[in-house]
Image (spheres, helix red, strand yellow):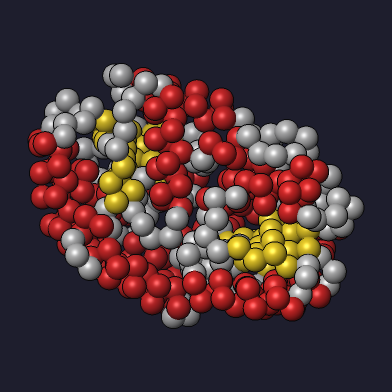
Amino acid sequence: MLLSGSIGMGHDAIAAACASSLESQGWSTVTLDAMKMLGPGGGSAGQAVFRAMLGTPGLLDAVHFSALRTGNRLARIADALARRKLAPVLRRYLDQHPADLLLSVFATGAAAGSAVARRYPAMRHIVLCSDVTPHWLWVHRDVDMYLVCAEVAELGVLRFQPAARIEVVPLPVRPAFYRPLGQAQARAALAIPPDERCVLLMSGAWGLGPVAAAAEALAGAGLHVLAVAGRNERLASKLAAVAARQPRIRAFGFTDRIPDLMSAADLVITSSGDTCAEARTVGRPLLLLDVVQGHGRDNLQHELELGDAMVTSAGPAEVTRCALAALDRAKPAPVGLVRSRADWESAFAAAISSCGF
């Protein structure tokens, strides 16, 4: 059983990648959404709170760095509320559908899994955290192993649980990113000239920041722009209007063609998150939009440290100036993958095996 959480798409994407890997190893899987398990209105209320914090300058930074990072009283209250809501629901499900492995890829899911783990002594509980600095809500008792995606993340777990068992693994991506089209083929499918510069512009499932204005500015600078709105319907309408007057823009709403769009692009402009790992797998440089507060700032700094990335403020002029500079520095698109699925699969399989499977 995988426990995800539908705040944005990042956790769901990681859950899907893990489920695919488990199934390739002979497991059967089911994925539950911790936000929906909160009951009618619970998931939407949680998303509304998170959106409100993102939309208030400095608020999510304050909550993340002062409360979640330190595990203060506010964080402990949030943890207790989540456990009280989710644990009975998870317990009823596991009583009817026993699992050998519970894999939590969402902090609230990790809390719920910890709350019920002792009831199922044969079940192993693994927590996979994709953030470079796991905050207090990620770390709980009755977790058999933590999987983290950077050495510095290991230290974040040890801060709260010095005896924790931890493995550093590559960040998984969905299977389609391990078999992308070649750039020429991807461009031909999108009618993008092979010798002109092209960028992919997206900012998570919520379409954070002034994406439409940035798309128009980038196209005005002579770039072909593949602009993705995600699940943001208001942004999708804005992008459609911009694309109607600017032929260099191709607008997309929520789409499963991201691997092809990345393959066609010379540069991926995005906020910090799982998209960065996907772009690195396909072999595209990054220009990071500094629009996600809290954990997003930690993750952005880590992406810069990994290299082949630049950062920009979200204003259209700043995005355009930095994009042109990044394209001038970019190397030719590689032929084939930069990151192998085998690296993730072998590390993941070894971690599961070490838990007794």
Residue 295 position, x and y percent, is 46, 60
Q: How many marks?
A: 0
Asked if residue 171 can be seen in this view, the reply is no
The structure residue drawn at horizontal position 15% and vertical position 58%, both measured from the top left corner, is 85
Quadrant position of residue 226: bottom right
Residue 278 lies left or right of residue 200; in this view the side is left
Image quadrant holding the N terminus, namely top left
From the viewer's side, name the closer residue of 264 and 12: 264
Residue 83's x, y, as percent?
A: 17, 54
Closer to the camera in the image, 162 or 216: 216
- The residue at the point 27 percent across, 63 percent down is 43
Quarter of the picture holding the C terminus: top left
Q: Is residue 180 above or below residue 290?
A: above
Question: Which quadrant of the view contains residue 235?
Answer: bottom right
Q: What percent of the width, then of the height, locates residue 307?
A: 70, 48
Give the residue displayed 30% in from the left and 68% down from the top. 44
Placement of 205 over or under 115, stated as above or below: below
Q: Position of residue 282 (x, y in %)?
A: 67, 41
Q: Nearer the viewer, residue 356 or 189?
A: 189
